[in-house]
Image: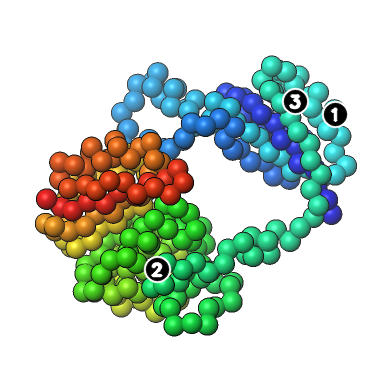
């Protein structure tokens, strides 16, 4: 079965209403993506907001120009639908549109085919559970990310794995703060860390991490827990692949749980955010120059 894909460009004010209208008109799925270049991140740690600031924050949940993509049945009358959409939200609020006929595909099979084993410095391999497993002597992690972030393919994750693979972790205590699928904790354990603590605030992430760690028979080396429910040790290496605002809020915490001359690795940052994060950590850590992959950055520092 073929599908019709309707792509519309609108503004951040009308995007959600447009999405709801498309669902009412029979769209099988609707997605919102960026049509303008500004990054969007959550604003954790901003509990006290004025009504004006809260309203402004709500308006920034979407991009100034937002692309709305709808998947529709092939017999949908798009001419009538477009007239109705323009009438409901205003013709000036739909900047452009595009219609494409999509051939039916094995979407799951295509996704799996695109995600093949990844190798890092010939020291570790990340293979998703549906892949044919490599026939070599390189230690391999079998990963099923589930609902949690982290397959090793995203630059923020691969930048962290590259650092771990290029350094000696023998007998080290490692904290993976914001562990997601548990991939960084497992890489550290596989590369010789003595103890690894994988912590997160998301229960779904913790569930996915526990499943992956059990599948790879690393439960004896890795403690998995909610960040509020575990007493973290002072670590030789602390690694955090999260977002800019949480990273800035956690400077003091990370300083407390990293030993003197211990390593800290930070990721989840756009390259344009690297200097601001460096400034935040420079009081407690001697920070190196950022390492970049595409638009993403990794920071490394040594505890003073």
Q: Is residue 138 above or below residue 44?
A: below
Sequence-wise, the earlier of marks 2 and 3 is 3
Residue 117 horizontal/vertical position (percent): 53, 69
Which of the labelled discs sits on residue 175, or is there none?
none
> Quadrant of the image for the N terminus?
bottom right
Q: Is residue 135 left or right of residue 15?
A: left
- Residue wearing tag 1: 79
Confirm or deny contact between disc 1 and disc 3 (CB under 8 A).
Answer: no
Q: Is residue 78 above or below residue 145?
A: above
Q: Is residue 155 left or right of residue 76?
A: left
Q: CA distance from mark 2 to mark 3?
A: 52 Å
- Residue wearing tag 3: 85
Q: Decide: few, some or many residues near mark 1? Use Cα within 10 Å; few <14, some 14-19, many ≥20.
A: few
Is residue 207 visible in this depiction of the protein?
no
Sequence-wise, the earlier of marks 1 and 2 is 1
Q: Is residue 213 above or below residue 20?
A: below
For the point 85% across and 29% down, which residue is it?
A: 79
Of marks 1 and 3, the one in the foreground: 1
Q: CA distance from mark 1 to mark 2?
A: 54 Å
For the point 48% across and 73% down, which residue is it?
A: 142
Q: CA distance from mark 1 to mark 3?
A: 10 Å
Q: Decide: few, some or many residues near mark 2? Use Cα within 10 Å; few <14, some 14-19, many ≥20.
A: few
Residue 184 horizontal/vertical position (percent): 37, 63
Confirm or deny contact between disc 1 and disc 2 (CB under 8 A).
Answer: no
Residue 166 horizontal/vertical position (percent): 32, 65
Which of the labelled discs sits on residue 121, or is there none?
2
Q: Is residue 25 left or right of residue 200?
A: right
């Amino acid at each position: 079965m073929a599908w019709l894909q309707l792509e519309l460009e609108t503004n951040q004010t009308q995007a959600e209403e447009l999405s709801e209208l498309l669902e009412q008109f029979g769209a099988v799925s609707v997605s919102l993506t960026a049509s303008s270049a500004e990054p969007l991140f959550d604003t954790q740690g901003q509990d006290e907001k004025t009504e004006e600031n809260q309203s402004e924050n709500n308006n920034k949940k979407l991009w100034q120009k937002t692309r709305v993509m709808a998947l529709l049945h092939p017999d949908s009358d798009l001419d009538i639908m477009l007239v109705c959409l323009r009438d409901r939200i205003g013709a000036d609020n739909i900047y452009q549109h595009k219609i494409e006929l999509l051939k039916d595909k094995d979407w799951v099979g295509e996704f799996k085919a695109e995600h093949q084993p990844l190798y890092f410095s010939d020291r570790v391999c990340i293979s998703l559970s549906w892949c044919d497993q490599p026939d070599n002597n390189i230690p391999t992690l079998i990963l099923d990310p589930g609902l949690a972030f982290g397959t090793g393919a995203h630059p923020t994750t691969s930048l962290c794995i590259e650092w771990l693979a290029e350094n000696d972790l023998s007998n080290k205590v490692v904290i993976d703060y914001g562990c997601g699928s548990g991939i960084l904790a497992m890489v550290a354990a596989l590369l010789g860390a003595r103890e690894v603590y994988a912590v997160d605030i998301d229960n779904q992430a913790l569930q996915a991490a526990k499943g992956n760690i059990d599948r790879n028979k690393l439960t004896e080396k890795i403690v998995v827990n909610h960040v509020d429910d575990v007493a973290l040790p002072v670590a030789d290496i602390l690694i955090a692949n999260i977002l800019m605002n949480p990273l800035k809020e956690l400077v003091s915490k990370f300083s407390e749980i990293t030993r003197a001359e211990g390593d800290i690795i930070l990721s989840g940052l756009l390259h344009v955010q690297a200097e601001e994060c460096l400034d935040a950590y420079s009081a407690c850590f001697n920070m190196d120059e950022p390492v970049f992959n595409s638009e993403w950055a990794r920071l490394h520092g040594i505890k003073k």
